Image (tube, grey):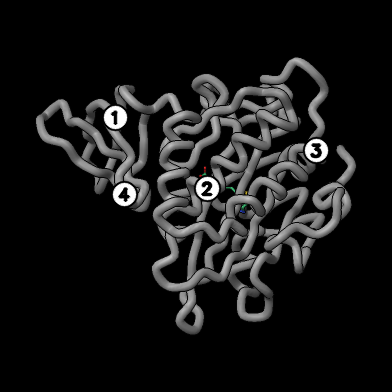
Amino acid sequence: MHRPLTQSDLLPRGPLRRLGRSLHWFAEIDSTNRFLLAAAADLPDGAVAWTEYQTAGRGRLGRAWQSPRGASVLLSVLLREPAGSPLGDYAALAGALAACEAITEAAGCPARLRWPNDIVAGERKLGGVLVESAAAGGRRVLVVGIGLNCLQHRGHFAAELREQATSLEIECAGAVDRAGVAATLLARLDEEFADAAPAGERVRRWCGAWASRSDDLGRRVRLVENGRTLEGTIVDLGEAGELVVQLDAGGRRAFSARTATRAW
Ligand code: BTN
């Protein structure tokens, strides 16, 4: 359908600071996240895996992530982080922020963030981030996986997703440069993950960036947690990236992305 993304598409200006020391391309694989997690013991920090098609792509909370062959950017990076690294809580936000900036810069499409890890255009989802982790010898291995819908037309989405999902092809005025989006995404991820500023400074920057790149603050929200549905108004982002909600039933509560899912 479309030309596969090559190593020189992803790294057009040569090596980055942290990401890309080890590169793994697959015409087809079950999941780039699964691959990096399974191979973590043998791979260096900053390893990158990308593919044209996933047969068992993973989304948050055990959902599937599906995309037609060659239509998306499907990419994962492996990070070895020390215990207590702020990325333990903020890797998904940092990844979503990088994706948002890459889309705006490379495709000229003003993407926004929607808690916890969605990249949206208007009310529709353009992409998402899934962070999975494992312990390895006193350090934490984080795999940050990103899926960005690039070339899909409306008919490519399953009927039940058609009202909720979108792509750069649908949203952007001009032709979509999938390779440019992928390269800019990897460069932006590298800026986020190679940043050695003190943890507090990075967290303040991520929270500030979330506030300016998201329309969530002040919005009504419905959250489902452990089978319970709760409604309220979003008032803040918590210290570990949780969504702080003023509940209609009374009281303020922080919801973790690990347990809560957003209905709208
Ligand atoms: C979500 O919004 O639910 C997160 C979707 C994350 C999908 C990406 S595609 C590349 C990487 N490999 C996977 O199996 N999942 C992530």
In the picture of the structure, the residue carrying the numbered disc 4 is 239
Q: Earlier in the sequence, mark 1 or mark 4?
A: 1
Q: How crowded is mark 4: few (under 14 residues within 10 Å), some or many (20 or more)?
A: some
For residue 152, what is the image quadrant? top right
Helix, strand or loop at disc 3? helix
What mark, if any, has residue 234 been given in the picture?
Answer: 1
Q: Residue 70 at x, y = what percent?
A: 79, 42
Helix, strand or loop at disc 4? loop
Q: Do the residues labelled 4 and 2 touch (CB within 8 Å)?
A: no
Which amino acid lies under the numbered mark 4 shown in the image of this protein?
Glu
Horizontal relation, residue 105 to residue 127: left or right: right
Kindly tell me whether residue 172 is visible in this rendering: yes
Q: Which of marks 1 and 3 is nearer the N terminus?
A: 3
Whether ligand 1 has any atom under 8 Å from the Cβ at mark 2 is answered as no
Helix, strand or loop at disc 1? strand
Q: Which of marks 1 and 2 is nearer the N terminus?
A: 2
Q: How crowded is mark 1: few (under 14 residues within 10 Å), some or many (20 or more)?
A: many
Which amino acid lies under the numbered mark 1 shown in the image of this protein?
Ile
Identified at 67% across, 20% down, the residue is 171
